[in-house]
Image (cartoon, helix red, strand yellow):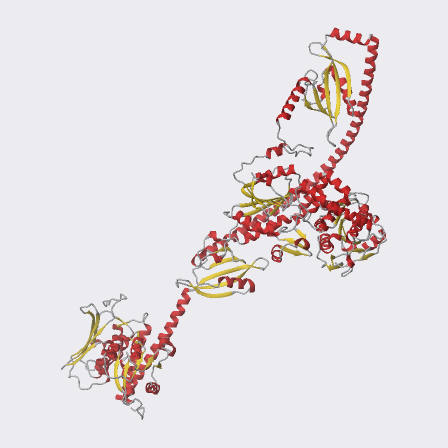
């Protein structure tokens, strides 16, 4: 199923960090359709940090679930920020429930509006 | 002051009986007296209205009813109309109407004080008949400003009610105490001399006299300095001359030289002049600096180290009208206000003068006397009551006023402070020498003595040491053993003896010796004698009187006529009576006295009246003088006959004497009869009185009986009420003790009245903290605005509510500040209640968390649905598969939402999922495994996996075929590190055909990938000839909550 004629993320490497397999699958699908090369999905905090710490090819963007198996994913956000990787929070909580330190980052609410997510990733 | 008001204004105060007194007063006022009169009365509204007409009948001067703004003019009379208060300002009357219910209790004081302030030395105050003590403070104010003061004494015109003038007189500030008609003359003289001083050059004669007075001034200074020890040369000349002139006027002298002579001759006049010069002695905070020093130095020392149960005792002897007492009371009260806990304070204020005490007890002063009281103190310690200032109860209650003489009565004791300002100046040196040791006796060791500016205790350096010499503050020397002069005081108190207070003269050698010798000679050689009073009662015996007197039979008596020996009795009676009646010395010679041995002694009897002090009872000295040696009876008869040459003469002599005696006896008898008659009359009338008294008593008794009955009834009623009150009180106490609502009752100054025991959770509070300000206590709550909140509640009468936390965050309170209303609904403080709302607050917080969690789950669920939809519909566009998966999701949600603690048992998941598909084929299925609680993540992922396995078994496996069997079993294993993991085995057997393994659908993906991804599980899916085997191993979170898997029953 093709949602977008254009491919706004053509050639970009996007990392998905999402603890739910199904949701991760769905996100991968959407991003691939938008032309991106999907990295992950990764479902665990320690794995994600290990993945990012390993020196690898540049990552152009990331979708970051706020809650990973009951833990907040802020440490990952810190690493991403340090690596200068733009990212978008995906959260099941209210839009205002993010910690104030991360309030400046883009975020989307679950269930994800695909266009909204793509627009925010493209803009990042 | 301008020329207009350069004439004296006379204020006249009268009350009950005043009309008669005013008539007398105006009789003595000549036409054109050169004065202006203002009459202030107490008479009631109804009766007062015609007073001007009445007065107009007494005098030729024009009489006006006073009105507001009336300009006073010379030789006119003004009368205060009823229902108003009058003052004078710049020679103009100021009148204020009173409300009908209002009543000025001291209108005379109010007017006199304002007159004194306005006209000063040109003011005069006249106090006529009246009750109460109004006018007393007024004349004092006038006297202080140098005006003339007069009070009425008895004559034809009253005073009918003498209390008012007597009260004025007793405080010692009245210049003339004269009958009403004589006042006019004094006032005219006053006006004349006032005019003389004002217009010095007007009359050469008077100017000359004034010049003489001026020159006499220095000699008067000298006299005062030498006799009193006080130097007045620094005084204002004009004031000094005026006071001297006032004394001259009182002494009816016109020449200054004559007055100087009088001063030299009469120490009393010097003392009187001295007192007049110092007259302005009692004012509030007179000598402000001295009182300031007292407040700074002495009062803190008094309070130092005193507990609440101690008492500070202050004695103010000679308190007069109380200004000094209340000044000290105000200072003490001010200091007490600064202390959280203060000892009790008692000020004993004493004076000889009951009337002055009456003024002090009323504690009501005209505004002018409060000149030296600061505005703050006036507002704090006085209440304004229609023109007068009344001392507030909190100061008044510190003071105890009682009549007492510092000279005559035994002193008070254990005092911390004795304040005796300007009393010693009224005493001579000898009395001072007695009084100052009395103060020493009255004070505790280290107690303080506070004297007036012109007084000192320098001659008693051994008793007192100066603390503030300038302000006359002394401290009792603790080491000085009191030379206890108290017994001397008591011993010297003999009735009827005024001059008891002679300085104690040490007995010098020569004089003492001489006195001793004289005593001895008198004892030995003087004739025996006794001293009797006019009734014949002996008050003193000399030695050797036994020969002439003997104890009479019967009740012991001192009556000389009864005690005289037989032969002497008649002569004694005659001689004594004659002496009493004539008041002269009477002697009788040749009285034969027969002694026990039958010998005869001729004696001479002398009775001599002794002139004692004026007014004292006269005493008579009775002397017995022997004439020659004692004789035998014969010798005596012989002597008698030889002496008088013949018996006839002797008998005639005896007869004559006997007649005389008879005559006097008759006279005595008649007198006695008269006396008896009058006594009888008196007795009759007394009897009548007793009779009527008896009747009255009978009636009273009946009344008392009925009153008693009534009291019994009232008493039992009161008892009932008391019981009800007790019950209510104990109910309240129980409520307090049992309630969990911490409540504290405060007064306006934040002082704790009472509190419930639950307060202990909120404040560090003890039962002994009652009476302390709550702000002194440390709170366990974060309540920084406590004081402001309470103040706001008291001020605005509005309840305030606040949510606060305990400092250790362990509890939350709802604090409610409400105003405390007394029985009259007046705000008297605040009630603060603390409701523990910890449970509510925590529930609220938990609710917030739950709402957020719910939102999270819902959104995640929707994301999962979105994802399933995406995946399912993309691969096989059949809604059926999608719906079934949604069904599985829904079931897992059902399990979750019905679970109590977000934990779902694995068996339930498996059973529910299989039951949905297998339905009636459950007999093919066997389930076994322990109870394992799983959380949300696990439930959802495992439920979907089992759903996929079940669907598969339904479509292609064990549940499809009749022979197929399905075994699901699971257990919890632990690896080498002790980490638990769930191992679930799905085993389908007895399949007739090998399952198709080529198709790797979404279902298989869910089993093989989703579990691995989401739960880090290991999955193994194997297909054999006749069986399907699926093994899922899921690491479980470490069991920290103790939910060790239970074996299924």
Q: Nearer the viewer, residue B425 or A101?
A: B425
Instruction: Identify the residue at image location x=39%, y=64%.
Output: B809
- In the current view of this chain or complex, which residue is farthest to the bottom? A5
Counting every numbered tag in the picture gives 0
Q: Foreground residue, B59 or B48? A: B59
Quarter of the image where the N terminus of chain B is located: bottom right
Q: Is residue B888 above or below residue B648?
A: below
Q: Is residue B758 visible?
A: no
Left or right: where B631 falls relative to B926: right
Residue B485 sits in quarter? top right
Q: Judge by depth and name the residue closer to the eye, B812 or B778.
A: B778
Whether residue B36 sits left or right of residue B223 in the image: it is: right
Q: Position of residue B280 (x, y in %)?
A: 68, 49
Q: Position of residue B503 (x, y in %)?
A: 64, 34
Q: Position of residue B394 (x, y in %)?
A: 59, 52
B628 versus A64 height, above or below: above
Residue B69 visible from this viewpoint: yes
Vertical position of residue B417 compared to residue B744: above or below? above
In the picture, the quarter occupied by the C terminus of chain B is bottom left
Q: Position of residue B120 (x, y in %)?
A: 73, 53
| Name of the residue lying farthest toward the left | B1025
At a point 46% along the width and 61% down the height, the residue shown is B834
């Amino acid at each position: 199923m093709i949602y977008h004629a254009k491919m706004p993320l053509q050639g970009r490497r996007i990392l998905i960090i999402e603890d739910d397999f199904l949701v991760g699958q769905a996100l991968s699908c959407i991003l691939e359709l938008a032309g991106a090369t999907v990295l992950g999905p990764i479902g665990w905090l320690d794995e994600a940090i290990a993945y990012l710490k390993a020196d690898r090819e540049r990552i152009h963007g990331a979708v970051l679930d706020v809650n990973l198996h009951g833990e907040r994913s802020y440490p990952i956000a810190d690493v991403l920020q340090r690596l200068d990787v733009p990212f978008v929070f995906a959260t099941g909580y209210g839009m205002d429930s993010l910690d104030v330190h991360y309030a400046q980052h883009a975020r989307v609410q679950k269930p994800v509006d695909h266009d909204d997510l793509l627009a925010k990733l493209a803009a990042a | 002051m301008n020329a207009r008001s350069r004439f004296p204004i006379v204020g006249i105060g009268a009350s009950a009986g005043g009309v008669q007194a005013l008539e007398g007063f105006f009789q003595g006022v000549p036409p054109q007296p050169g004065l202006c009169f203002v009459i202030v009365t107490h008479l009631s509204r109804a009766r007062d209205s015609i007073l001007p007409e009445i007065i107009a009948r007494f005098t030729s001067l024009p009489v006006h009813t006073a009105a507001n703004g009336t300009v006073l003019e010379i030789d006119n009379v003004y009368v205060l109309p009823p229902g108003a208060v009058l003052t004078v300002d710049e020679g103009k009357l100021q009148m204020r109407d009173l409300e009908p219910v209002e009543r000025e209790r001291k209108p005379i004081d109010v007017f006199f004080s304002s007159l004194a302030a306005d006209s000063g030395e040109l003011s005069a105050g006249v106090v006529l008949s009246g009750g109460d003590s109004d006018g007393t403070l007024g004349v004092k104010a006038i006297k202080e400003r140098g005006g003339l003061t007069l009070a009425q004494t008895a004559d034809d015109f009253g005073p009918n009610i003498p209390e008012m003038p007597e009260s004025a007189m007793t405080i010692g500030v009245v210049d003339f105490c004269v009958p009403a008609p004589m006042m006019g003359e004094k006032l005219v003289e006053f006006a004349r001399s006032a005019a003389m001083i004002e217009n010095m050059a007007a009359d050469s004669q008077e100017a000359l006299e004034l010049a003489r007075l001026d020159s006499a001034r220095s000699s008067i200074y000298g006299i005062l300095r030498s006799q009193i020890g006080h130097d007045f040369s620094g005084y204002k000349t004009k004031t000094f001359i005026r006071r001297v002139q006032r004394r001259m006027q009182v002494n009816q002298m016109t020449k200054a030289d004559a007055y100087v002579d009088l001063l030299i001759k009469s120490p009393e006049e010097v003392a009187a002049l001295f007192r007049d010069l110092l007259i302005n002695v009692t004012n509030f905070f007179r000598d402000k600096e001295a009182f300031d020093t007292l407040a700074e130095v002495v009062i803190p020392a008094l309070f130092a180290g005193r507990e609440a149960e101690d008492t500070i005792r202050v004695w103010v002897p000679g308190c007069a009208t109380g200004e000094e007492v209340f000044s000290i009371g105000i200072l003490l009260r001010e200091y007490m206000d600064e202390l959280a806990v203060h000892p009790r304070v008692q000020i004993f204020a004493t004076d000889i003068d009951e009337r002055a005490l009456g003024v002090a007890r009323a504690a009501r002063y005209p505004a002018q006397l409060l000149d030296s009281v600061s505005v703050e103190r006036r507002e704090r310690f006085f209440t304004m009551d229609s023109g007068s200032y009344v001392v507030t109860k909190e100061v008044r209650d510190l003071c105890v006023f009682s009549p007492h003489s510092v000279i005559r009565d035994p002193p008070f004791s254990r005092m911390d402070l004795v304040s005796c300002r300007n009393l010693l100046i009224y005493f001579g040196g000898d009395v001072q020498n007695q009084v100052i040791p009395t103060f020493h006796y009255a004070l505790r060791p280290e107690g303080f003595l506070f004297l007036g500016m012109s007084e000192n205790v320098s001659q008693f350096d051994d008793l007192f040491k100066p603390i503030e010499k300038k302000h006359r503050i002394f401290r009792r020397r603790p080491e000085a053993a009191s030379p206890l002069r108290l017994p001397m005081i008591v011993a010297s108190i003999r009735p009827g003896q005024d001059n008891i207070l002679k300085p104690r003269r040490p007995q010098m050698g020569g004089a003492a010796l001489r006195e001793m010798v004289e005593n001895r000679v008198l004892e030995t050689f003087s004739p025996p004698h006794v001293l009797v009073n006019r009734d014949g009662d002996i008050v003193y015996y000399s030695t050797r009187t036994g020969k002439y007197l003997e104890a009479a039979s019967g009740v012991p008596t001192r009556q000389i006529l009864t005690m005289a020996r037989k032969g002497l009795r008649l002569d004694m009676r005659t001689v004594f009576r004659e002496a009493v009646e004539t008041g002269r010395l009477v002697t009788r010679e040749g009285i034969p006295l027969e002694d026990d041995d039958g010998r005869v002694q001729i004696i001479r009897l002398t009775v001599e009246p002794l002139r004692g002090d004026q007014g004292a009872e006269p005493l008579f000295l009775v002397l017995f003088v022997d004439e020659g040696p004692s004789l035998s009876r014969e010798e005596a008869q012989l002597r008698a006959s030889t002496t008088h040459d013949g018996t006839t003469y002797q008998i005639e002599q005896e007869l004559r004497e006997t007649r005389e005696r008879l005559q006097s006896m008759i006279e005595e008898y008649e007198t006695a009869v008269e006396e008896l008659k009058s006594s009888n009359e008196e007795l009759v009338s007394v009897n009548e009185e007793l009779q009527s008294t008896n009747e009255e008593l009978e009636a009273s008794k009946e009344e008392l009986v009925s009153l008693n009955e009534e009291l019994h009834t009232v008493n039992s009623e009161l008892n009932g009420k008391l019981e009800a009150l007790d019950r209510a009180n104990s109910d309240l106490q129980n409520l307090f003790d049992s309630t969990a609502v911490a409540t504290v009752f405060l007064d306006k100054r934040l002082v704790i009245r009472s509190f419930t025991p639950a307060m202990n959770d909120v404040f560090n509070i003890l039962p002994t903290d009652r009476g302390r300000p709550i702000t002194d206590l440390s709170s366990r709550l974060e309540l920084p605005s406590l004081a402001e909140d309470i103040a706001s509640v008291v001020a605005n009468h509005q309840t305030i509510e606040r949510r606060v936390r305990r400092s250790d965050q362990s509890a939350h309170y709802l604090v409610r500040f409400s105003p405390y209303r007394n029985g009259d609904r007046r705000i008297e403080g605040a009630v603060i209640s603390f409701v523990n709302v910890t449970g509510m607050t925590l529930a609220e917080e938990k609710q917030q968390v739950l709402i957020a969690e719910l939102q999270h789950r819902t959104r995640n669920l929707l994301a999962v649905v979105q994802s399933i939809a995406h995946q399912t519909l993309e691969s096989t566009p059949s809604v059926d598969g999608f719906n079934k998966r949604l069904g599985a999701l829904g079931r897992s949600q059902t399990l979750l939402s019905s679970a109590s603690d977000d934990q779902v048992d694995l068996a339930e998941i498996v059973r529910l999922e299989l039951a949905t598909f297998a339905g009636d084929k459950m007999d093919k299925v066997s389930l076994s495994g322990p109870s394992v609680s799983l959380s949300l993540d696990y439930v959802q992922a495992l439920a979907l996996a089992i759903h996929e396995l079940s669907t598969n078994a339904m479509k292609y496996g064990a549940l499809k075929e009749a022979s197929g069997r399905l075994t699901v079993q699971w257990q919890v294993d632990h690896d080498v590190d002790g980490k638990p993991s769930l191992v679930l085995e799905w085993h389908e057997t007895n399949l007739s055909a090998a399952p198709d393994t080529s198709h790797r659908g979404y279902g298989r993906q869910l089993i093989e990938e989703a579990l691995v991804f989401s739960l880090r599980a290991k999955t193994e899916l194997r297909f054999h000839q006749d069986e399907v085997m699926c093994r899922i191993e899921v690491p479980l979170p470490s069991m920290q909550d103790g939910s060790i898997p239970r074996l299924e029953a």
